[in-house]
Image (tube, rainbow, N blue to C red):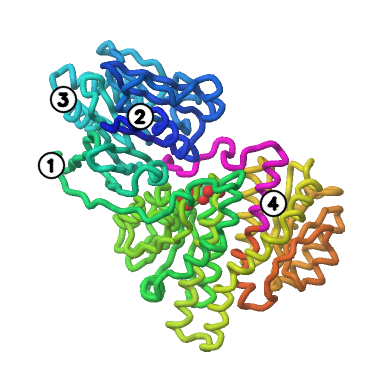
Amino acid sequence: MCGIFGIVTNNQEISVGKVVFDGIKRLEYRGYDSCGIVSLCNSKLYVKKEAGKIDEIYKNVKLDEVPDGTKLALAHTRWATHGTPTKQNSHPHLDCLNKIAVVHNGIIDNFMELRNELSSTGHTFNSDTDTEVIPHLIEDFMKKGFNLKVATINALKKCKGAYAIAVCQVDNPDTIIVARKESPLIIGIEEGKTTYCSSDIPAFLPLTRKCYIMEDNELAVLKAGEVNFFDLKNDNELIKKKIQNIEWNIDAAEKGGYEHFMLKEIYEEPNALRLTMKISEQLLSKFANALLSADNIYITAAGTSYHAALAGKFIITRFLGKHIQDIECSEFETQLKGSLQNNSVIIAISQSGETIDTIEAIRWAKKAKSVKILTITNVVGSSITRYSDHVIVTNAGPEIGVAATKTYSTQVLALALIAVSIAKIRKIISDEDIIKYYDALTGIPNIIDKFLEKNVDLIKYIVNNLEKNMNYFFLARGISIATAKEGGLKLKEVACRFIEGYSAASAKHGPISLVREGFPIIFIAPPDETYNRLVGNVMEFKSRGGRIISVVVESDVKITKLSDITIRIPQPADKYHNLFSPITFMPALQLLAYYAALAHDLDPDKPLNLSKTVTVH
Ligand code: F6R
């Protein structure tokens, strides 16, 4: 949550205002409660900041206009944690003398203590944020004669919590100091010319492909086209880091003609899945063998990734012959304290690789027992990978839309590939069946392509038909409960509707009492072993006046007859395809959520109160 961006350059050709503005705009998915930019010129800091989304702010405050000759600027886009989303609480935050500016992503847990201490020695605060203690601490250490770098190190020593910070100070007009602990920070570099710092790679990708990924407890001194790294845990020793060359194409991080990232990313699913199919056999069998030799297996994640975990758990257990316990990452330690055993394996899923609850769950488990962590993430080098024994990277490409779409499908695909790898190793199904499962997986991108080609008008029609409804059920049985929960979450987050994604069987034990004439119920109904019982559930809801919208395969007859509207997925009705329906059925529900958001005049890329990367507990 929160995005930070900075630039220091000696390149006269560069418009620093435009670069820093474009950079922070690309990070807006991380938070859009407020935005601020500070530029340093002629020994003065120029701050522009305001509450709201960047485009709204820009109407009144031209954030990209900085004084002529500016060579250094920092920017911040905020997802509020401490202090309401107001101009005052927006970053950057300054010291008492307006000489030091700080932008920060993370949380300083002991800020109250520090603030009281600083206030008692005469510091004045202008915001309610935790961040504001940092410039004041640096100010104190500089007053004591330390230079900017050492003053920042000393200030950070006093801070408990998580941070990625960037600092500038008027007497050091060619230097940005950055540091990282538990919040992501990447340094982009055009050697000899320009250095960038950013919360993620796509923000500077149009400018350079060369970067360094900072690790926890590292501090860096950035000058134009030059960077030095220091190890805060080891006497602030100078360290050598490996430069990385980013292969992504910047088009992947831009809208490319689509109105929103969410729509673009739904349409990218087939290709993302094709690329994810290329995960090496060797890596898959590492995952498979680890699961086969484990005494206990857990799968953990948050939000959409947790729904992918539910679907994946179902697929894997089909072939594994062992139980997998799913636990939301925020509950992991609480629920397993006292019962986690050695020789357990934990599958952790996080598209960003930065969700703090997921990282803390595995960190705790590693500390508590001898366990193996198998991670599925979409971001190479993300924090979670540091605590993992084996890592699958899903190859979905950058996902900017706050609502996860293509990363969900590729996570489920990765889990399905592990499942088939297990089946192969265990030889529990025939070679012919293995081939059929692989063929079904390979065919998924074409099924989704075909669906997207023909069904947009139908989805828009359904959205118009349901427009006035505020409440919905998404119901299913078996593996499709995960689909119902994820489809419901999408509609909830982008279209601000209340949705219960639930088991169709359990719904009659309570939720059914909400059903009145016209109440919309979306049934997820692939023709698997639960189908006939689901027919019964559809009748229960229909007879009480429910409006039935069902998602079925093309050849479906029974549930189609009971439904007011059907969404038909162009896939064969066999057991091979049914097992992977969480992937093939999902784009329909993602599109439904997308068009519902538009119908309600909401921006699907920026759902209310959300952030793409949740780095707070
Ligand atoms: C919903 C969504 C969130 C994330 C959750 C976990 O569309 O994106 O629910 O799935 O915050 O994020 P990651 O996967 O980055 O750990």
User: In the rendered structure, which amino acid carries the disc numbered 2?
Assistant: Leu
Q: Earlier in the sequence, mark 2 or mark 4?
A: 2
Q: Single out the mark in the foreground, 2 or 4.
A: 2
- The answer to whether the residues at label 3 and label 4 have Cβ atoms under 8 Å apart is no
- What label sits on residue 592 in the rendered view? 4
User: In the rendered structure, which amino acid carries the disc numbered 4?
Assistant: Leu
- The answer to whether the residues at label 1 and label 3 have Cβ atoms under 8 Å apart is no
Q: Is residue 616 magenta?
A: yes
Does residue 289 show up?
Answer: no
Look at 53% across and 78% down and name the residue there.
438
Which stretch appears magenta?
588-617
SS for dot 4? helix
Query: Would residue 297 be found to the left or right of residue 450 on screen?
Result: left
Q: Residue furthest front?
A: 13
Q: Single out the mark in the foreground, 2 or 1.
A: 2
User: In the rendered structure, which amino acid carries the disc numbered 1?
Assistant: Glu
- What label sits on residue 147 in the rendered view? 3
Label 4 CB, ligand 1: below 8 Å? no
Give me the C-alpha separation between circle 1 and circle 3: 16 Å
- What label sits on residue 74 in the rendered view? 2
Label 2 CB, ligand 1: below 8 Å? no
> How many marks on residues?
4
